[in-house]
């Protein structure tokens, strides 16, 4: 009877030890970890303008600072400009990876090797509701823009977001700089 | 024999589970295919037309998948928890677990590849997320079902010398998964080694190997 108990205890100890070793292996192995560096984004640049539409863009770098390769399955912008905050423009926003430009708003799933990164091109298209974009942007307000991303790596997929602030003064400066140059 | 063969990639639109691969070949390549030709088709496209796709959102990884994917090198499709779970769904999780254990033990004595030998065909054929072109870049694509049957169906419809379903990539790896009777997979693999299918965005999932039968007869003469 004592022998059986010793055997069972020994098996349990071995199993716990194996589980501990595997757990430590996982800890050491780590996983992908993405960071969108909105504090390092470029300033807004006016890409095009006509009487009622102005298109601006900026670049936002991102990195996989984790210890494993990771896949960004999807990534998109979500601008937060409710009509209660400002009702003078209609806003559309989209993004693309700088090295994989595309104009359809689709984000092609992207493997990002560990400790590397890429850059997003973020585009904002403002359409004046009263058909005069310069007048509409003159009263523009600051608003939030979320970069929403879906990641899959060693662990299960998740969706996260990184918020950046679009400052109205920056929009107006970009507009003025371009129109002055023109 | 390779020097005498002309390989003709055939462009198609994006194929989906609503398409039939034999109908597609007939639509896009019928006039280009002769009785001495071999028609080869990319395995991932065959699988997609068979509806053999899933997505991470549709899978619920089990504990074993979460553990086992950690032991697969990063570049492999099974290194993600969903690639592993997808393989388990078709090959059985206990078979995969046994294969991994055997593979790890075999590595200790210097033998590689045992895991994939024992885990089943789909373990080696699954393409994880990003493995296929949009809109399937967010999907997991299994290997095709009955590739030899598909090849026979292509031959019967198109009247060609033969047909093959092949898994080829830009890393000089070509595996012929299914062929019509009389064709040698190893020979076709060598012919397709330079990936005439191109990358996914080129949308050329069909490659006609022109005058294969004549070249073979000449080589054997």
Image (spheres, coloured by chain):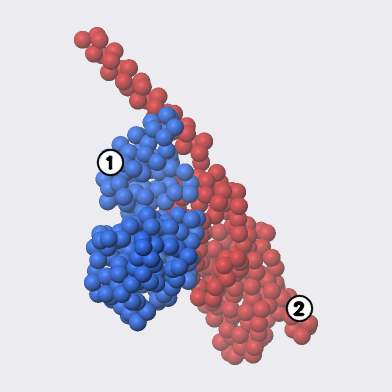
Chain colours: A red, B blue
Residue A89: quadrant of the picture: bottom right
Q: Chain of mark 1?
A: B
The residue closer to the viewer here, B183 or A124, is B183
Taking the image as shown, residue A10 lies to the left or right of residue A162, namely left
Which residue in the protein does label 1 denote?
B95
Image mark for residue A29: none
The residue closer to the viewer here, B179 or A28, is B179
Taking the image as shown, residue A2 lies to the left or right of residue A163, namely left
Residue at screen point 31% across, 66% down: B163
The residue closer to the viewer here, B100 or A159, is B100
| Residue farthest to the front, as pictured | B221
As drawn, A18 above or below B121:
above
Quarter of the figure that contains the N terminus of chain B: bottom left
Q: Where is residue B173 drawn, in percent x and y? A: 45, 54
Mark 1 Cα within 10 Å, few/some/many (few <14, many 20+)?
Answer: some
Residue B145 showing in the rendered view: yes
Q: Chain of mark 2?
A: A
Q: Where is residue A145 drawn, in percent x and y? A: 56, 67
Q: Where is residue A54 drawn, in percent x and y? A: 63, 82
Residue at screen point 24% across, 9% down: A2
Which residue in the protein does label 2 denote?
A177
Residue A174: quadrant of the picture: bottom right
Residue at screen point 55% across, 44% down: A67
């Amino acid at each position: 009877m004592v022998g059986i108990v010793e055997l069972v205890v020994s098996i349990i100890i071995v199993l716990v030890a194996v589980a501990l070793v595997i757990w430590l292996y996982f800890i050491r192995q780590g996983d992908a970890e993405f960071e969108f560096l909105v504090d390092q984004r470029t300033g807004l640049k006016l890409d095009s303008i006509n009487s009622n539409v102005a298109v601006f863009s900026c670049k936002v770098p991102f990195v996989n600072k984790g210890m494993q390769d990771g896949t960004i399955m999807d990534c998109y912008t979500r601008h937060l400009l409710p009509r209660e905050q400002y009702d003078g423009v209609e806003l559309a926003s989209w993004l693309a990876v700088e090295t994989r430009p595309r104009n359809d708003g689709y984000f092609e799933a992207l493997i990002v090797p560990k400790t590397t990164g890429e850059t997003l091109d973020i585009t904002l298209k403002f359409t004046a509701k009263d058909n005069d974009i310069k007048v509409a942007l003159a009263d523009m307000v600051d608003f939030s823009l979320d970069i929403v991303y879906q990641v899959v790596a060693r662990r299960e997929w998740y969706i996260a977001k990184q918020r950046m602030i679009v400052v109205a003064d920056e929009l107006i400066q970009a507009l003025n700089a371009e129109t002055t140059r023109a | 024999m390779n020097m005498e063969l002309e390989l003709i990639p055939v462009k198609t639109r994006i194929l989906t589970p609503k398409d039939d691969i034999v109908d597609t070949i007939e639509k896009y390549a019928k006039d280009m295919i002769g009785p001495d030709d071999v028609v080869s088709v990319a395995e991932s496209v065959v699988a997609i037309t068979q509806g053999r796709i899933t997505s991470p959102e549709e899978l619920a990884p089990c504990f074993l998948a979460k553990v086992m994917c950690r032991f697969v090198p990063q570049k492999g499709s099974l290194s993600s928890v969903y690639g592993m779970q997808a393989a388990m769904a078709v090959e059985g999780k206990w078979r995969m677990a046994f294969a991994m254990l055997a593979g790890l033990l075999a590595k200790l004595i210097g033998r590689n590849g045992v895991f994939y030998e024992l885990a089943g065909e789909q373990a080696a054929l699954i393409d994880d997320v990003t493995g296929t072109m949009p809109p399937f870049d967010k999907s997991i694509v299994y290997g095709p079902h009955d590739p030899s049957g598909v090849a026979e169906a292509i031959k019967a419809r198109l009247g060609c010398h033969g047909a093959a379903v092949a898994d080829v990539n830009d890393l000089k790896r070509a595996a012929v998964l299914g062929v019509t009777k009389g064709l040698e997979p190893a020979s076709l693999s060598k012919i397709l080694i330079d990936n005439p299918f191109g990358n996914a965005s080129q949308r050329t999932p069909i490659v006609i190997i022109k005058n294969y039968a004549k070249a073979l007869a000449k080589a054997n003469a």
